[in-house]
Amino acid sequence: MADFHKPGVARLKPEFVLADYRPKIDTEYLSQETKDEMAELDKDKEAGDEPQAKRIKLKGRNKKRPIVGKKRLPADKLCPAIVQERDCQFGEKCKFNHDLKKYLDEKPPDLGEECYLFETYGKCPCGVTCRYAKPHLDKDFKNITKPGLETMEKKTDTVSNVLTKDLQHLLWKRKYDFSKTDAVLEKLCPSANHQKKLAESYLKKQETKKAESEIAAERSENTEPENKNAASSQVENGSNDSNIQVINSKLDIPPAPIKKVPILLFIYSYNETSATPDSTAGQNAPVLLFFLVIQFQVGNLPFRRICKQYGADITCGEMAMCTNLLQGQQSEWALLKRHKSEDLFGVQLCGGYPDSMTRCAQLICENIDVDFIDINCGCPIDLIFNKGEGSALMGRQSKFEQIVTSMKSVMNVPLTVKMRTGIHDNKNIAHTLVPHLKDWGVAMTTLHGRSRTQRYTKTADWEYINNCAEIADPMPLFGNGDILTYEDYNMHRKNSAISGVMLARGALIKPWLFTEIKEQRHWDISSTERFDMLKDYVHFGMDNWGSDQQGLEITRRFLLEWLSFLYRYIPVGILEHVPQLINERPPFYRGRDEMETLMASPNCGDWVKISEMLLGKVPDGFTFLPKHKANAYK
């Protein structure tokens, strides 16, 4: 057993360890490119050659991933008008399928006898396309409503922050009124208002072209004098220019009023009410949940609902790009959705310029329901960093100040910041930024105890987090990094001046961590309970993305991404010494039952098998590779 007790390997009870076992990698769901890369690495390993370039290649993200599932053409999809049982406004020009009989003949068999959406809301929005359609279809294949339950109005009440068509059209046509932001930018950073200048230039060119075409038309027809055309052109110009108002740069801009129940009030009231003479350090602060969409890709609405079930106090949406939000992209706005169970919810924005960030802040405060807005200054991805966004903002203090100051001027909710210790290894700069953030009026800061170049190598520097927390006082500072058990939480709360913690990887590996922290215990959760949790996730996924074939495949994709983290959990009853450390890799082991063994498998083929238990067999030609190389613990 000495082999398995070396540093970086978890200590398991001997009866569960498979000493001579090496799992065979199931390549059935891997793309050909991935198979070729694996064969090349195995060949080099046999030859004893492992160049530095290849070791680097194994770190980080799988950038050339195969496409999950088969792309479906519009002709393969049933027309939404038929699903909603209404007339199609496009008639013969409609690109979707209108042959209901043909669709039903080709449709795969139902996956079960009970539809979650029908049972929950009384009516399934997917109608005949639902993969559980039998309970809610009559003999004519018409969708029915369950007696005694509310209709889909109940469903629309559970999720808010949905992009409306009217707002989307205003953003597409650049007609949304950003005069409030323009006034702030004109005063605080006149040179930063690039988008306004581009819009003005575009409108002037359009007006000039329109005027020239009208003059040319009048001259050719010789019906009206030229001066009348010029007058009408001026009127039209005035109407177009009304969307971009000229603001007096000397105008005093009062700070926007903040809501009466901000995030700070929650933090302080929680600390006061939970701090009893017998309470431990681990019970005196809320647990904050943050996720980065580019990094994890599983911090979506269904997963946040799972975390709320286990006791998360504060939830935050996935990282949204401000430029995409301003363009009215439906996929980006979906990241801002809020479930009614998320009683304290914020959105996380990524951007590198005051104009786009401030416009986005105004847009969010005026159109959706949030309790705080967070600026992401911690994203380490090259694509984001090279544009001066994410963690790059830490090295652009002047631009950072403009962004914070201008955003606060148009917001009626608190502004928070998430950042890392620095950009480069051994060059921490967060302590130089924290006093400025406090002076700029940031409501709260969250600090991840690693630099950008570190990614997830080495352990989080909690000593440095404590130093920054002491500097930040009285501004709350939350710590983040390597918290996987309530003991980790208690230790950092007791030995540092932080106001709370942010959980990320720890919550991905074991979402019940919130319960463990609040109840101060190690939960030896059974495989049955974990499988029930996955069932809930699938139900929430169908609620969010639909129960038709497309919705189920989206749910499957995010479920597989999550399973690439869930398998790292080592059951408490198998550990020789509790607790499990986040950077320790277990030896190959046998679980206490077959399901526990399957859930512990590092093979993505086994993750696909788990998804098939919940969502049916995968389509032909299905391939999957996790977005991150989840096997790399260090």
Image (tube, rainbow, N blue to C red):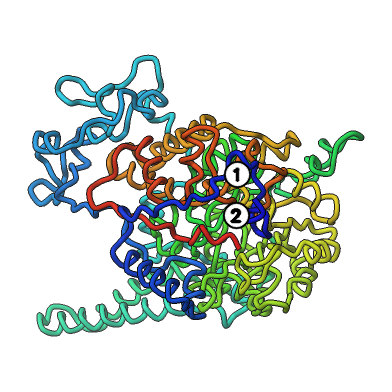
Number of numbered markers: 2
Task: Assess disc 2: are there few (<14), some (14-19) or many (≥20) residues with their C-alpha within 10 Å of its C-alpha.
Answer: many
C-alpha span from label 2 to label 1:
9 Å
* 9 to the left or right of 136: right
For image coordinates 82% across by 36% down, the residue present is 273
Q: How far from the left and from the top, in percent, is residue 381?
A: 52, 70
For this orientation, the residue located farthest to the right is 277
- From this view, report whether residue 254 is shown above or below residue 591: below
Q: Is residue 413 visible in this depiction of the protein? A: no
For image coordinates 13% across by 38% down, the residue present is 106
Image quadrant assignment for residue 419: bottom right
For image coordinates 17% across by 78% down, the residue present is 224
Task: Give the amino acid at mark 1.
Answer: Ile
Instruction: Provide the residue designation for mark 1.
Output: 570
* 82 to the left or right of 231: left
- From this view, report whether residue 428 is shown above or below residue 515: below
* 602 to the left or right of 511: left
Instruction: Provide the residue designation for mark 2.
Output: 585
Residue 539 - label: none
* 280 to the left or right of 74: right
Q: Nearer the viewer, residue 626 or 125?
A: 626
Q: How far from the left and from the top, in percent, is residue 566?
A: 53, 46
Task: Assess disc 1: are there few (<14), some (14-19) or many (≥20) residues with their C-alpha within 10 Å of its C-alpha.
Answer: many
Task: Give the amino acid at mark 2.
Answer: Arg
Q: Earlier in the sequence, mark 2 or mark 1?
A: 1
Q: Nearer the viewer, residue 87 or 505?
A: 505
Q: Is residue 345 visible in this depiction of the protein? A: yes
Q: How far from the left and from the top, in percent, is residue 259?
A: 68, 48
- From this view, report whether residue 287 is shown above or below residue 134: below
